[in-house]
Image (cartoon, coloured by chain):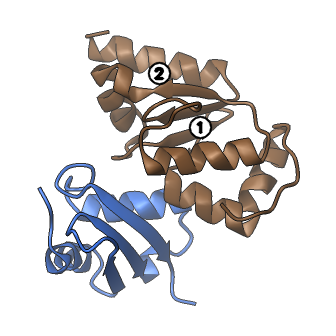
Chain colours: A brown, B blue
Amino acid sequence: MTQVQDVQDWIGKQIAGNEVVLFMKGTKAMPQCGFSMQVAQILNQLGVAFKDINVLDDMGVRDGIKAYSNWPTIPQLYVKGEFVGGCDIVREMFQAGEFQELLTQKGIAHNEQTLTA
Amino acid sequence: MAMAVSEIEKLIKEGFPDAQVSIEDLAGDGDHYAATVISEAFRGKTRVQQHQMVYDALKGQMGGALHALALKTSAPS
């Protein structure tokens, strides 16, 4: 993917087509950055099914998602089309139980784990 | 590629003159920081908006010269 608009369209489709999408460095099986790993771990701990998109596979997506969200860092988590945040926000929300509330509100299946990440 | 604590603090204070800012150098390598910013400007904003405001104040350094900045933002209680 080279055209900026194509990348933006592709990103939009991923976000629209998957309930929970994590743009991350590496994969959920093998994260390649501690911040990406933390968010993947929280989702795994809560038993949330999610689509992982490895931004290291495509420089266009890596830059494109930053522009798409107006957010300068990776990871980035989307739930039902809404940008939730990066590692700090997801962790803070998880520890406060707010992330679990958000999942419930959005109708995303998850278990009731409240252990801290 | 690294940024000094004083430089980060200066940019944040320019963006939020009323802010209480504390910055910690997590790894002692001038590259991994944690910052807490408390400002009236955050009141009524979502966490995403609050962080975006700080990133704006950092004028594009975040994700560039500034590799890792763990952020915690809030309005004064």
**In-image side of A72 versus A96 (left or right):** left
C-beta proximity under 8 Å, tags 1 and 2: no
Q: Quadrant of the N terminus of chain A?
A: top left
**Image height check: is B55 above or below A50?**
below
Q: Amino acid under label 1?
A: Tyr
Q: Which residue is mark 1?
A: A78
Front in this rendered view, residue A32 or A58: A32
The image shows residue B57 at horizontal and vertical percentages of: 25, 65
Element carrying mark 1: strand
The image shows residue A113 at horizontal and vertical percentages of: 83, 56
Residue furthest to the left in view is: B1
Q: Chain of mark 2?
A: A
**In-image side of A82 versus A44 (left or right):** left
The image shows residue A24 at horizontal and vertical percentages of: 47, 35
The CA span between labels 1 and 2 is 11 Å
Front in this rendered view, residue B56 or A50: A50
Residue furthest to the front in view is: A30
Q: Residue at x 56, y 51 (%)?
A: A38
Q: Quadrant of residue B6?
A: bottom left
Q: Residue at x 20, y 49 (%)?
A: B64
Q: Residue at x 52, y 29 (%)?
A: A27
Q: Quadrant of the C terminus of chain A?
A: bottom right
Front in this rendered view, residue B12 or B22: B22
Q: Amino acid under label 2?
A: Ile
Q: Which residue is mark 2?
A: A11
Of callouts 1 and 2, the N-terminal one: 2
Q: Chain of mark 1?
A: A
Q: Residue at x 44, y 15 (%)?
A: A9
